[in-house]
Image: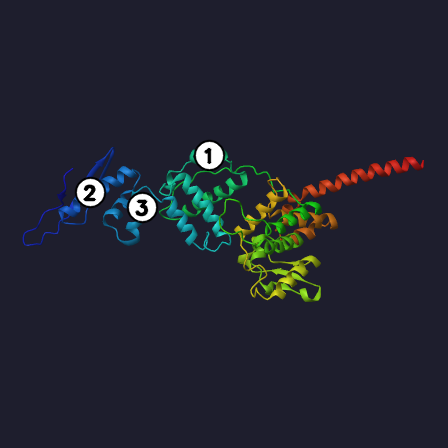
Amino acid sequence: MPLALKGTVKPGQPDKRYYMIRVQVNDRRVVVSSGTRDRVRAEAKERLVIDALDANRDLTQAELVALVRGEGHVRSIAALRASGGLTLKTAFDRCFADPHVWRSIRAQATYQTNCKHVMKHFGEDRVIASITFSDVQAYITAQLDSKPPSAPGTINRRLACLGRMFSAMSELPDGPKTIPKIKYLPELGARKFSFTHQQEAAMFKAVAELDSLVPGSKGGPPRRRDAHLYLRLFKVLVETGVRLGEALRLRWSDVQGIEHDAGVIRLYRMKEIKNNKARSVPLTAEATAILLAIKAEGTRPVGPFQDLGKDRAEHVWNAAKKLAGIVDHDCVIHALRHTCATRLLKATGNINLVKEWLGHTTIKTTADTYAHVETDSMVDGAAALTSLRGTSLARS
């Protein structure tokens, strides 16, 4: 419909008429004041209304008015709704800026990686309100069918980012009115690999040998001779059961009593520990000797492993694992923590002690993770009963 000025001019009065926008898009008819007497500006606003209704036919009259005549935040929200709504990138950016969502989380880098994976699949400009349950299921299928396939736990971490974003955005005025249901995959449980003492010796021997290997025949940059530094890190991990990230962030103020044969690592900075659970970990004689040797060098004033990094630790570990001929997929650095806990449980039989040592929040986590140790103990018990029966029969 053509633009027309609304009303009539009274004799002797200035002309204060505004152009009225009257459009019909499909079966939706809209009448809204342009708020201007400039025909060119009114035509531009008319086109804005038509494009907005083409993109989102569910816009309310109030949102259209805000789009045409609103100012500041009100208009920006209306424009966002008119374009179809929040995009994935905008929504994730808001989550990382919000202190109640991800701004203050310890594992922000991991969350960012997972969010990038979600955006790579759906597209950064995908309007979140358009993502359906079927779309989420297709995303899960795509990950299971990838080469190599993503593990259920990895997929669930990515889905958790998507779900948390939807939950946070649904509370905002320009957020989606409905959110898709997300069904998580059953997980296979924690990695169960733990070293025997023989495997540990072979692995650590391989780490030590990395520094003496010659560069490949094809040349390339000189080989970094730092495996011996990571060997000390790995030995402390298997002796204490602390996580790799916790060890890398250790400061000398966290390591106490090593000069008096009563060493302990105190993990108490909440932003640097998982589950926000402070704990103290006693040091074995082996761990104490390693930390004393590092301290005596005097080259690391902040912490024993201040110059080491996670990525390099993974690289050294995988190279040594290959050299040692270990092919088990679950033989990762975190297996050193499992090894410490498994040995501790076998030695003491005290699962509550292991729970506190590892910093688990519930006994169920510890029991579920180390159920295999209890199963091994029961097998030993069955063997003991069999032996006892044989001894009794022999005596009779």
Question: Where residue 112 sits in the image (x, y, percent)?
Answer: 45, 48
Q: CA distance from mark 1 to mark 3?
A: 30 Å
Residue 14, quarter of the rendered image? bottom left
Residue tagged 1: 142
Q: CA distance from mark 2 to mark 3?
A: 17 Å
Q: Which residue is nearer to you in this view: 28 or 363?
A: 363
Name which residue type carries label 2: Glu
Residue tagged 2: 46
Give the mark, 2 or 1, whose residue is nearer the N terminus: 2
Where disc 3 sits, the SS reads helix
Q: Which residue is nearer to you in this view: 263 or 105?
A: 263
Q: Is 143 rendered above or below residue 8?
A: above
Give the mark, 2 or 3, whose residue is nearer the N terminus: 2
Residue tagged 3: 80
Question: Where residue 357 sits in the image (x, y, percent)?
Answer: 66, 54
Q: Dividing the image into 4 quarters, which one contains the C terminus?
A: top right
Say whether marks 1 and 3 touch (CB < 8 Å): no
The reply, left or right, for residue 366 in relation to residue 64 is right
